[in-house]
Amino acid sequence: MNLFYVSCMLVAVSCLSACSMRMPPPDDFSFRPDSLKTYNIHLVRQTQDDGTQNGKPYSIVWREKAGMTLRFISQEDTLYHLKLCFTKYKRERPDSGQAIEQDTVAYEPAPTAAQVKNDANMEIRYWYSLAMGVTVDVWMNKKGEVARVDGYNRIVDSVVARCAGDRRTIAYVLRNGLGEEAVRDYLTCVFPFVPARRMETGKSWVVDQTLTSMAPILLSNIYVLNRRSGDTAWLNVTTYLSARRSEQGLTYMKGKQTGTITASYSTGIPYKYRAEGETTIQTDKYYRLTRRSIYAVVR
């Protein structure tokens, strides 16, 4: 009987522990990644520049595509420690500024070592392909803001160990797409939209951000929780973009974009994010209108 009683008590304690682990989180809209899930992120950013320089018109389309995984490691004080791994990356110039849908951004096969001979562009693509699968460490807070990124040197070391390229050149070339500031910008595009407090339908909040991998761009985002059904939340976002020459300098770039987000209320993880807008840059020497599009899916 005693053994039977002890066994029953152990089973009961186990059940209570399991149930407590499955209890719903507090009803605040915060970044709270699932410790048992690996998130697959597909991000596309596209710009179409139309303008004049020294009196001559030009038009350029750039598209950047990144595939990443994000996995919870631990919670350290108020920060979540996660591992980010690039799975795909490409920066390209498509023929036109066509809409960016998920089924129109297929990645081409990575080049082989034999294909890169005497072709600088192909060699850069080869370096990027060698960097896929290497992880970097990321720390994020309950607002989904990136507090720290570390590990770019691991990416460079991995590429250098597998090819005959110069380390300094490889580090310089890959930094724009895979460097720590680039990682921060990718995650800033996707995650920091939650207010880290209870939010009711119809309410709005503001999140200010800065993209730093290129020239610093200031973002002032106004989010509105339009609807919530169960754990799914639907949001609208209006973003005002600006850039200045210095902290006290004149604003030379400004614009606006609007978008929608579908997300998990309990984890603050977006399922889908789409935004489009325009910015203008005007200086003494040139004028540029940039049409911007962002598309992100997280599974």
Image (cartoon, rainbow, N blue to C red):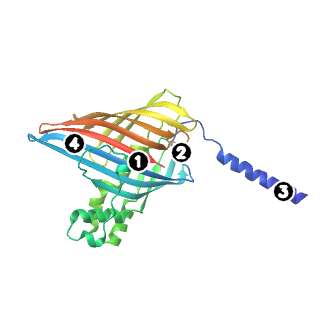
**Label 1 Cα neighbours within 10 Å, binned few <14 / some 14-19 / many ≥20:** some
Q: Are marks 3 and 4 in contact (CB under 8 Å)?
A: no
The residue at which mark 4 appears reads as: 49
The image's mark for residue 9 is none
**Precedes in sequence: disc 4 or disc 1:** 4
**Precedes in sequence: disc 1 or disc 2:** 2
Mark 3 or mark 4: which is in front? 4
**Precedes in sequence: disc 2 or disc 3:** 3
Real-space CA distance between mark 3 and mark 4, rounded to the nearest whole angstrom: 72 Å
Q: Are marks 4 and 1 in contact (CB under 8 Å)?
A: no
- Could you tell me if residue 184 is visible in this image? no
Q: Residue at x 38, y 58 (%)?
A: 88
Mark 4 or mark 1: which is in front? 4
Real-space CA distance between mark 1 and mark 2, rounded to the nearest whole angstrom: 15 Å
The kind of secondary structure element at disc 1 is helix
Real-space CA distance between mark 4 and mark 1, rounded to the nearest whole angstrom: 24 Å
Which quarter of the picture shows residue 243?
top left
The image's mark for residue 6 is 3
The residue at which mark 1 appears reads as: 187
Closer to the camera in the image, 92 or 21: 92
Residue type highlighted by circle 1: Leu
Closer to the camera in the image, 250 or 60: 60
**Precedes in sequence: disc 3 or disc 4:** 3
Residue type highlighted by circle 2: Arg
Residue type highlighted by circle 3: Val
Residue type highlighted by circle 4: Asp
